[in-house]
Amino acid sequence: MPVFTPGRRYQNPFMPFKREPFKKRALAKIELIVKGPLFGCRMCGNCLLQETAFICPMECPKGLRNGPCGGSTPEKCYVDESRPCIWYKIYERSYKLGREGLLLEVLPPLDWEKAGTETWGDVLEQAKSVGAKKIFAGLAARETGSVSKTLDSIFRPVRQPAWWQGDSLYHAPKAVRLEPVSELERRLKAGEFVVAAEVTPPLSLNTEKMKQNIELLKPYVTAINFTDSPSASPRMSSWACSKLAVDLGVEPVMQIAARDRTRVGLQSEVIGGAALGVRNILCITGDSMALGTSPRGRMDIVDIDAIQILWILRRMRDEGKYLDGREIKTPPKYFLGAAASPFASNIKFQALREQKKVNAGAQFFQTNVVFDTDILDEWLNEIAKRDILDKVYIMIGITPLKNYKIASYMSDKVPGIFIPKKILKRMEDAKDKGNEQEEGVQIALELIEKIKTKQGVQGIHIMAVGWEEIVPRIVRESFNRK
Ligand code: SF4
């Protein structure tokens, strides 16, 4: 087992795409011989060890390079339960070493041309360009921060290539965008308490049921989310459902899961979505293929993660640039959202990740389902400490429980969801009395009542998971509507 990467499982090193010159191949071999046993290096060719407390993030089965997914727990990775979540370990060690600030830097996706090749050559080149004299002086200087500044002058250009230039700063939406681009944005900006709801896309070409659901929810919600093949099982695409909603006069929130996107596909899809009238986009990493149907697709890699999507989409909109630097003459307009997970991992770690999403471009959060408002309070406090409450609109996820079976399935099997025992007990008792649905609705109403009073919360997002017909009643009773 590698010395510095806890609980690592062997994963093959990447192979270079093309044959490198001998000198480079020899250097790559030496790098692998040294970094393999120490860090479990997979030769991604885009080393981030400096930023990740010297634990290699390429151990993450999802290939995430910007932090854990919403399903992380201290005990195990949900994709492969035989190992710990490597990002949890990175966060833990970063806090221990006082390096957690480095975790805020938005790191680029792999440059696949470099995968399988050495990083040391790039580091040496960069060191040469800084100059030996300057480096020694910087390392020997007594001023605080001089050593890390010197090291940064060598490593930063290597890990942040010109086509990415990620940082740890907050990037406010550009001034020209002060006008809201969607009704959802307008209402949130106006300080209204907003309701959004989710409609599950159909499994076939028959869109009748979905259209009925859209019409049913229309008077009660500001926007409707269309999931993007949840549980890694294919359904009608989110953009197609979004377009159908636009045609019916309803504002969609198009979800985009990084799992199924290449960077080319992503950029073309958002330009297309914007052209079709989609104005709200929710960027998520997506459930792993491990949750999906068989035969399974690759479980070990995603090309881009949710934070990188936010970074790319924000720059397309605000800087009018594709990832490759080409100019977009008429940039797309959209209101960018991200998922937040108050119950995954450790709340302190989670808050740091939410801050990173806001810095990258998230303007609104839709959280995972909430059943415990005490833990929600703790999460909101951590978010407040990170000074992002005034930079992002927060909508809390609500799921009315239809029966005890669904409640226990969600509690046991769905990563990032926590249902307190007392709620499970209420649903179990209701099952014995034969009124599970009513109990589920009452629980949802009680939660919304508490959530409405929380400072920093601007709305709810109802995920009825196939029980859309209950949404009007919940909205009516929660907000005294007719
Ligand atoms: S980040 Fe890439 S180069 Fe660095 S140790 Fe991990 S696999 Fe190796």
Image: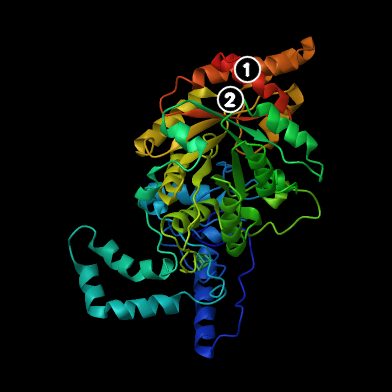
Does any portion of residue 465 appear in the rendered image?
no
State yes or no: discs 1 and 2 in contact (Cβ < 8 Å).
yes
- Give SS at disc 2: loop
Whether residue 294 is situated above or below residue 178 in the rendered picture: below
Whether residue 194 is situated above or below residue 137 in the rendered picture: above
Does any portion of residue 390 appear in the rendered image?
yes
Number of on-image labels = 2
- In the picture, measured across the screen, residue 191 lies left or right of residue 21, that is left
Whether residue 44 is situated above or below residue 336 in the rendered picture: below
| Residue indicated by mark 2 | 371
Q: Residues within 10 Å of mark 1 (few under 14, many from 20)?
A: many
The label shown at residue 443 is 1
Name the residue rendered at 56%, 31% in the picture. 222
Residue 399, percent from left and from top: 64, 27
Three-letter code, disc 2? Phe
**Closer-to-camera residue (466/210):** 210
Residue 172, percent from left and from top: 37, 48
Where does the N terminus fall, quadrant-wise?
Answer: bottom right
Name the residue rendered at 65%, 45% in the picture. 78
Give the residue at the far left of this rendering: 142
Three-letter code, disc 1? Ile
